[in-house]
Amino acid sequence: MDRNEVPPWVLALEQEHLEFIRKFVLNSGSLKDMAAAYQVSYPTVRTKLNQLIQRIEAVQEDDVEFVNMIKNLVIDERISLDVAKVIIDKYRMDKHH
């Protein structure tokens, strides 16, 4: 997979988050097994998962708001569609590098 194909929410995650996701998948999504793997309580793992969910949602919401603003400028004929595409691509590239 090329870096440009990686979703923005993945690029916004820290290595620690990616490792949590990897362990989560390898444990078939079992929070009980995750708690055992991390040697912490179930509520601690649940809290960590909730924080990860919030992080992913925040990245997606930021992108949606910005892209919608740019699309509205196109609709209002304040910028061209080609310019909008360049701005959005540049925004996403800068934001995730």
Image: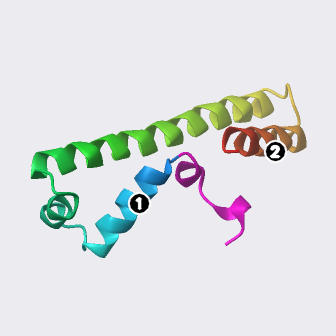
Residue 13 forms part of the magenta stretch: no
* Residues shaded magenta: 1-12
Give residue 14's position: percent from left, percent from top: 50, 47
Q: Which amino acid lies under the numbered mark 2 shown in the image of this protein?
A: Lys
User: Is 7 left, or right, of 2 in this rendering?
Assistant: left
Which label sits on residue 19? Answer: 1
Front in this rendered view, residue 86 or 82: 86
Q: In this view, does 30 lie above or below 83?
A: below
Front in this rendered view, residue 74 or 84: 84
Give residue 68's position: percent from left, percent from top: 64, 34
Give residue 37's position: percent from left, percent from top: 21, 64
Instruction: Mark 2 or mark 1: name the one nearer the start of the chain.
Output: 1
Q: In this view, does 95 lie above or below 42?
A: above
Front in this rendered view, residue 81 or 17: 17
User: Which of label 2 and label 1 is nearer to you?
Assistant: 1
Q: Residue at x 35, y 46 (%)?
A: 53
Q: Which residue is drawn at 68% across and 38% down?
A: 95
Quarter assignment of residue 6: bottom right
Secondary-structure class at tag 1: helix
Q: Which amino acid lies under the numbered mark 1 shown in the image of this protein?
A: Glu
User: Is 25 left, or right, of 9 in this rendering?
Assistant: left
Q: Residue at x 31, y 74 (%)?
A: 26
Quick one: label 2, few (<14), some, or many (20+) residues within 10 Å? some
Which label sits on residue 85? Answer: 2
Q: In which quarter of the image is the C terminus?
A: top right
Q: How far is disc 2 from disc 1 in space, using C-alphas? A: 33 Å
User: Is 1 left, or right, of 39 in this rendering?
Assistant: right
Front in this rendered view, residue 32 or 53: 32
